[in-house]
Amino acid sequence: MRRIPANQPLSYPIRLPDRVQEDALRLLDVTREVINATVAALWPQLDAFGTRDSPYAYKQVTALIGPGDAHGDRQWRCEAEQAGRILRGQAQRKKQFTRILPLLSAGMIEPKTESKPAGKHRKAIKQALADLREGDADGGSAVELQSLIEQCCNFYLKQGCFPAFYEEMQPIPVLKVGILPYAADDGGDKGQAYHLRLDAQKRVIFFAFRFPDAAGRWTRKWAEPEMALTLPDAVVERLQGGTPLAPMLREIPEPDGTRYAVLDFIIEVPVPALAEPMQIQRVLGWDWGVRTLVTATVVDLSGNRLAPPLFLDSGGFDGRQAHTRRHIDRLKKKVAKLERQRDRFPEGDCRREPSIGKLALLRQEIARGFRKYEARNKDLAHLAANLLILLATVWEAELISGESLKSLKSEGRGRGAKGRWRNWRTNAQIRGTLWRTLRYKCHVTGIHLAWQHPKGTTHTCPRCGKPANTYADPALDAKKLDAGPWLRCFACGWNGARDYAAAINIALLGVSFLKQAVQSPPFESQDRPTMTKKGLNSESYTGSGLALRLPPTSLRGRLQAGGKIYVNGWLKSVTLHSALSHETMLRLCG
Ligand SMILES: [Zn+2]
């Protein structure tokens, strides 16, 4: 549990009308150049951004450097704000780098052999990360630390040694997608870079912004009259208890290479107070599954299961991702072939031209593929986080209990072509996004979130607490596997999906954690209970007394044996939403 601020900004992107798109994108392009030049100029003074005296990043920037080009003082402040935010982020990362620096060792590199080139030693990296464990961290930064170690190893593979300092490894960051925070302008009617007026009753905002013309001239006159932008219902609802903040202009690149500009309308909302530990009656436990992405259930303080298990299946999603990966791989092969073709001729030879032209197109297509791939991963993490919040809300669970990210469990989620995208790295990325998103959404929804030790959760009977094995399928004579999908306890007879067992166990750990906190507050100082010391089992399934009317169950194949309710994992086919009231949905869409 972490202390949380009382207010939280929420951002809603609104697409600007077509007639101003060109002007907005031109503004963002010019801005981006100024920001990149500013970051580059201040890069040698990166450490100065490691401390913050003001919430405004622009103050740090303008204290060190003047405007390169006179687009107006307030316009420069907005650009400086973004440059300062980038530098602050990098300074933070540099601090993390000093934490991993002592851990870097040649053992992380697998030397080149006859059969394969030099590469990274995953086990050694994993071990180094485990050594960094902190009692109070939820593992959210494990993903960042891991990416730093990976970056250092990549450096080693190229240079033959680890970087001695951060800047040796990290090139000067370049902003590739336009972004302009208006936070440093006076806004409203007095703004010099933008004007914004809100008419909450008519549910519109009137917005105008300053931009250079096609010849790059910044006119004094506001060329564009105010445009009226309609606010979505969810935003109007948020405005009732919230305060609008300075907006942000941002470019959104589409996977097909086109782009458009949006205005991020930002509202600061008060965060609902968290329930006192004494008041919490129900705990939602969820597990990052082996066969399914997320499995969740709810228990009461006696360990009774109140809710049927809910599974978020990412089957269709896996297929799409695998398809995109294969497409990218094919394109990469074509690139390699074309490069060989091109290099048959010396520099400057016109016979290189056809290959060069085709290469540019192929690289564009590869970049498009990766963008699509990453956007889908992000969507999936958001979907899973939304679903968990939704379930906690409708099942009235005020504590969400999840597995610590630090385990970075990498067991294969299937083999073959589909297994490709599910390798542990990508998996860790989605998990990182899911955990961060969940933490943020719990925060604005007012739900407690606590991580638990994952050890033993998948191989312990949730009913009697004894160690249990997992099997290939529900049959009594099924083959025993290390990480089988079915858990069967021969001591008490309980059997069910392994992921479901894990979700119940994690929920039980959450209950133990809660009971400790009630006996000796505060929440923050609690040691996490372990499976051997949780002192609580899940005797029965009651499945009653809950408000939620779940949609009709659509059971599939042998999963019927477990009484599962299935929600298909691709965004378009999630139908659970339809079962909820409009009011609940509005809360969750925010
Ligand atoms: Zn048992």
Image (cartoon, helix red, strand yellow):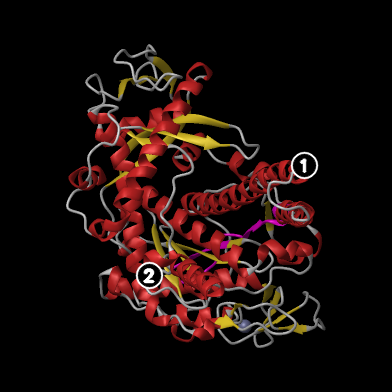
- Magenta segment boundaries in residue numbering: 296-317
**Quadrant where the C terminus lies?**
top left
**Which residue is labeled 1 in the image?**
354
Above or below, 278 against 238 in this view is: below
Give the quarter of the image for residue 235: top left
Where residue 176 appears, as percent x and y from the top left, is: 48, 43
Where residue 84 appears, as percent x and y from the top left, is: 30, 47
Where residue 23 appears, as percent x and y from the top left, is: 46, 21
Q: Is residue 309 magenta?
A: yes
At numbered mark 2, what does the secondary structure look like: helix, strand or loop? helix
What is the total number of numbered labels drawn onto the structure image? 2
Q: Nearer the viewer, residue 286 or 320?
A: 320
Label 2 to label 1: alpha-carbon separation: 44 Å
Q: Nearer the viewer, residue 427 or 485?
A: 427
Q: Amino acid at mark 2?
A: Phe
Q: Residues within 10 Å of mark 1 (few under 14, many from 20)?
A: few
Give the quarter of the image for residue 456: bottom right
**Quadrant where the N terminus lies?**
bottom left
Residue visible at 21% across and 54% down? 52
Q: Nearer the viewer, residue 128 or 230?
A: 128
**Which residue is labeled 2 in the image?**
97
Q: For ligand 1, give the image quadrant.
A: bottom right
Answer yes or no: is residue 404 visible.
Answer: no
Answer yes or no: is residue 25 visible.
Answer: yes
Residue visible at 46% across and 81% down? 128
In-image side of 429 versus 222 (left or right): right
At numbered mark 1, what does the secondary structure look like: helix, strand or loop? helix
Q: Amino acid at mark 1?
A: Pro
